[in-house]
Amino acid sequence: MKIMYIVHLTTELAPLAKVGGLGDVVSGLSKGLIEGGVRVEVILPFYDHLDRSQLENLKVEKGEWLFKVYSAQYQGISLILIEPEKPAKSLKRGVIYGEEDDLLRFSYFTNAAMHYLLKAGKHPDVLHVHDWLTSLAPPLYHEIYKSMGLKIGGIVITIHNMKYQGICTPEELSPIGLHRKHLLKQDKMEDHSEPGKLNLLKGGLIYSDFITTVSPTYAIEIQKEEGFGLQSVLIKRKDKLVGILNGIDTSYWNPETDPFLVQNYSPNDELQEIEEGKIKNRKALYAKLKLDYDPAMLFTSISRLAKQKGPEMIKFGIEYVLAKGGQFILLGVAPEPELKNEFYTLAEEYRDNPHVHFHFLFDERLAHLTYAAADCILIPSLFEPCGLTQMIALRYGTIPIVHKVGGLSDTVFDIDHTEIPNEKRNGYTFDCPSNDSLRWSIDRAFEDHKNHPEKWHLMQKNGFHKDWSWKKPAAEYLSLYQKINR
Ligand code: ADP
């Protein structure tokens, strides 16, 4: 049988270049596909802050292109690293996102990647693009590159987050040749709320062969209000829309082998040993953060501090947990200045409180140790396409408290819900995103942790033994790719 050849066009690849879940998905899915015998290539911007020491066989690719192209191997994945010429120094900013010209930076990158595929004579069976950031590739292919000779079996776009769509004037895209009048129409790329402007994500949704999103529930939600204005486009294409629940990279997120833990523990250990392992990690975490060890219940949130993540409820959760005698470690970066101020003010208020720690940095190592050390993780997101932190937490024996929405609803099942089979119950869920609902779930967690160890252990056991890996989702993606190429 012919080996399938898939190219991912992405702005993140975890942990090499990671901001959030998108990076985790591309690396986990790529590894899952490679294990399934698929040939995978990942095209990524060559950001200046990539840790080059992690790249094997890094070399310049020779060819007729106007920009630098490198190839390398990274954790078994074949990488193509591209440095587009424009905008100037676009990848030398020390960051992935958050620059004023992000739209141009990633449009140039996407165009450069298409140019590279054409010139290098590559003909993937499937080009897989992710979010608005690379969603210009499908229109570019159909409007420009196909007629130039590029052959792609089919294009899949995955929506990791509908909120961000990439809106610009047609003139902004003229340098990459997409300044075409007919695109500025409602049935093409014209934005729904800003007439006269182009919507890059919409282009991706219309020009791709298949649209996937990262959980079955989110696939339904985005056809309603979570579509952020693009619901009608998705409803029209609903027979090409599928929700595939993300996995996590279970070799990377594995308490049994995790090199960032001071004490590894295995899901097969007795619960007592697991508890001891968690306590050792907690002591190490406290030592690292210069906190005094205290056996009170430890809660955490490991999250971008953006509106989507329910920051008001996170703040309430911190205060409520502390008021109840628990402890809290917050690990999060706030990209929006207003929220940043709010959280910095809160941290200042609690400066002398030894039961809470605020860590406003992206810190991979600390995240691993915190997943292992904590008892509970709060995830009160207002919307959540999939969410990875609840799956990672469950793998480390940490119980999630979540707003039942999107992928959280597909992965976390309430311990007290009588209609859910015992073997699925693994956390606390609430239907309405409010402080009252969160308070109710935090109360239940304190009560069960103290007085109902059998319930606690059931949740831990169910979390440990569920297969969170990419095996099943990768097989689902593969059958989608095969459908396209049939
Ligand atoms: P999103 O992609 O919306 O940010 P996800 O739950 O899908 O949210 O993925 C978040 C990922 O980012 C997880 O792997 C989580 O561990 C990680 N993460 C979030 N904030 C931090 C942080 N401050 N330091 C380290 N890792 C973080």
Image (tube, rainbow, N blue to C red):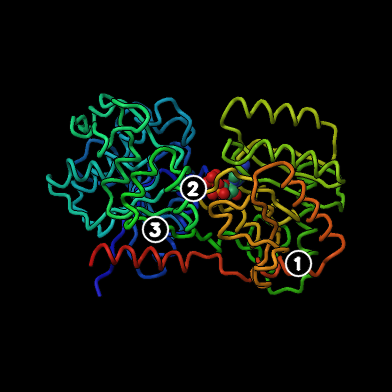
Ligand 1 closer than 8 Å to the CB at disc 3?
A: no
- Which residue does the image show at 39% across and 58% down from the upper left? 242
Q: Secondary structure at mark 2?
A: loop
Residue type pointed to by label 1: Ile
Q: How many marks?
A: 3
From the image, which quarter does the N terminus lie in?
Answer: bottom left
Picture residue at 59% right of the left edge, 25% below the top: 337
Task: Name the amino acid type tagged 3.
Answer: Val
Answer above or below: position of 389 versus 113: below
Q: Is residue 174 visible?
A: yes
Determine which of the numbered discs, if any, sits on residue 242 in the image.
Answer: 3
Q: Residue 277 or 262: which is nearer the viewer?
A: 277
Q: Secondary structure at mark 1?
A: helix
Q: CA distance from mark 1 to mark 3?
A: 37 Å
How far apart are the two marked residues, 2 and 3, measured between alpha carbons? 28 Å
Q: Is residue 370 left or right of residue 62?
A: right
Q: Which residue is under mark 1?
A: 274
Q: Is mark 1 within 8 Å of ligand 1?
A: no
From the top left corner, tell me how far across and down residue 434 is, in percent: 68, 42
Disc 2 designates what residue?
16
Give the spatial CA distance, label 2 vs label 1: 30 Å
Element at badge 3? strand
Q: How far across and down, in percent of the image, does residue 284 sit?
A: 77, 52
Q: Nearer the viewer, residue 456 or 417?
A: 417
Q: Earlier in the sequence, mark 2 or mark 1?
A: 2
Q: How dense is the environment of label 3, judged by Cα within 10 Å: few (below 14), some, or many (20 and up)? A: many
Mark whose residue sits in front, 2 or 3? 3
